[in-house]
Amino acid sequence: MSQREFELIRRLFRERVQAADDLPVGIGDDGAVLRVEAGELVWAIDTINAGVHFPTDAPAHAVGHRVLAVNLSDLVAMGATARWALLSLSLDETPDEKWLEGFCAGFFELAERAGVVLGGGDMTRGPLAASVSLLGRAGQAVVTRRGARLGDWLLVSGTLGDARAGLDIALGDDHVINEHERSLLARYLYPEPRLGLSEPLARYATSAIDLSDGLCADLGHLLRESGVGAELALDQLPLSPALRAHAAEEAPELALAGGDDYEILCTAGPDQVEALESSAQAAGLTLQRIGRIVEQRGLQIRNAEGERVSPPTGFSHFGETDA
Amino acid sequence: MSQREFELIRRLFRERVQAADDLPVGIGDDGAVLRVEAGELVWAIDTINAGVHFPTDAPAHAVGHRVLAVNLSDLVAMGATARWALLSLSLDETPDEKWLEGFCAGFFELAERAGVVLGGGDMTRGPLAASVSLLGRAGQAVVTRRGARLGDWLLVSGTLGDARAGLDIALGDDHVINEHERSLLARYLYPEPRLGLSEPLARYATSAIDLSDGLCADLGHLLRESGVGAELALDQLPLSPALRAHAAEEAPELALAGGDDYEILCTAGPDQVEALESSAQAAGLTLQRIGRIVEQRGLQIRNAEGERVSPPTGFSHFGETDA
């Protein structure tokens, strides 16, 4: 790299990083050195590609936020608390200083809020993309996709479908957008990892998964891993006022199949579900009961009248999955 | 993802993964769970992009090997022993089964040899690229780029310049290649992480860096981080018979500036250098003394006659750097 690039990276990354007791060697070496206690760590990696996971012209600040947010969401779903991050950034041309500044601002603002320190990474040429690997400490228990049990309640955080509606707005031609649309667009551009749920999940949930592909698709993963089925109450899906106002008719479909919500889907036994809800509430977050775990494999969806509704056909415009 | 893709991933990845005591939760969840002892871990991430870090038509087997090899090389340079990996794979179309099989074969063959277990990752749409994040245990000491001291010997493993010559062969039109060229091409396609050097470095080296950008560029990083300069003896650079045969005149330039060698450059004090060399030799690897650390900042290169030679101008065809 050129001297200019070197100085840019030094200014944007190295000078923002504080040494920490549990990160004795950080940015600027072949690897980061972490100091850990004996116990369990939880570890994730997620890549976001321009034109696939975010629009090529998305604000750099939102891209920096997103690549960390989607990884934080993974760790929350495991009941873990993130602590260390590595970042790999591919840029298709000589780094644009303004773009990198925006990216770093988005990344570090969320990192600070989440208590995450950056331990280094690499920057390289290639189609615009960012990968983060995130490591953290397991909570009181590790929450997986495998623990859902017959009779468990199925719960979801926040509201569903907003991000998908926001994506449609981002991809649309309309330059004048109203307040609702602005709020949906923000839900798409700035997925909010539900950090406060880590501890409640670790204490009270039997299983959890974060919603990146859409409720039906991700619930499908959870059911398959747990070897159970579920009944979902369509009229219990949490919908935001903005989504109801923007797409009243389509809203349930967007909630079932829309991706990018990064809400947490989880299960809890009947004797633990209230403790889970109170504990989430104490962290300022809501969990809505949307169904139950049943013996019969697969997913049954019922509307307010108790009639069965077909699940939306596989929603895979991003074609994403976990390996 | 489709059912077919799901089954493909299950067959290629999940079924090849053995449960391990220190990996209680692996592939198939939002994150991997690691069980660790108290102490220091060393952690790296590296991304390789098609058309930048490997030719788009490179054999899938070589791509799977490469993405793990370049990360292993980072951990060796820190004196650490790799143990856990996460993989993020971007594929520009529906997974080609044959390609993925080749990739997995290359990846897992090296993983097994290195004692590395795969803990999961993600697979997603995007321009062909792979990222690996690799975590391992620190050795007796952590080796960084900052420890080179006045009077230290400068040493390098293996031979230099082969990979760059191999890249030129890979990008060339010649379909008939001789034995030397085949060997250089293999050096480019299959960088060999010097796993056996982890322990010798942790015991005896004062600093180390792996050679991805080329000797001069990476030595520059090491000198800057250590706050010292170096004198390099051009006639001491280890050149392979294949490189001498293929490019006699250009060989020293390729050794100085060619990238992708993934050899280890390290320093050791006069009282430790022999122990370092013997210890490397016991692991079946050679370290060649190529210069000394001096007080005067920057890099001085001398030829066999003791005359100063200009360093090659910044070689950055890959424009790669560490953040």
Image (cartoon, coloured by chain):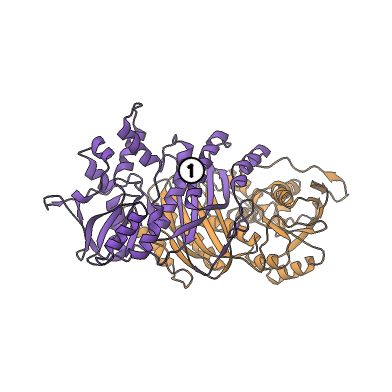
Chain colours: A purple, B orange
Where residue A213 appears, x then y in whole percent? 33, 50
Between A252 and A173, the residue placed more toward the observer is: A252
In the rendered image, the vertical position of residue B39 relative to residue A263, given as above or below: below
Between A322 and B246, the residue placed more toward the observer is: A322
Return the residue at label 1: A64
In the rendered image, the vertical position of residue B81 relative to residue B144, given as above or below: below
Residue, x 74% and y 46% (percent of image)?
Answer: B253
Residue B307 in sight from this viewpoint: yes
**How packed is label 1: few (under 14 Cα within 10 Å), some, or many (20 or more)?**
many
Q: In which quarter of the image is the C terminus of chain A?
A: bottom left
Number of labels in the image equals 1
Residue, x 18% and y 50% (percent of image)?
Answer: A310
Where residue B68 appears, x then y in whole percent? 54, 58
Residue B97 in sight from this viewpoint: no
Q: Quadrant of the N terminus of chain A?
A: top right
Query: Could you tell me which chain the residue with mark 1 belongs to?
Result: A
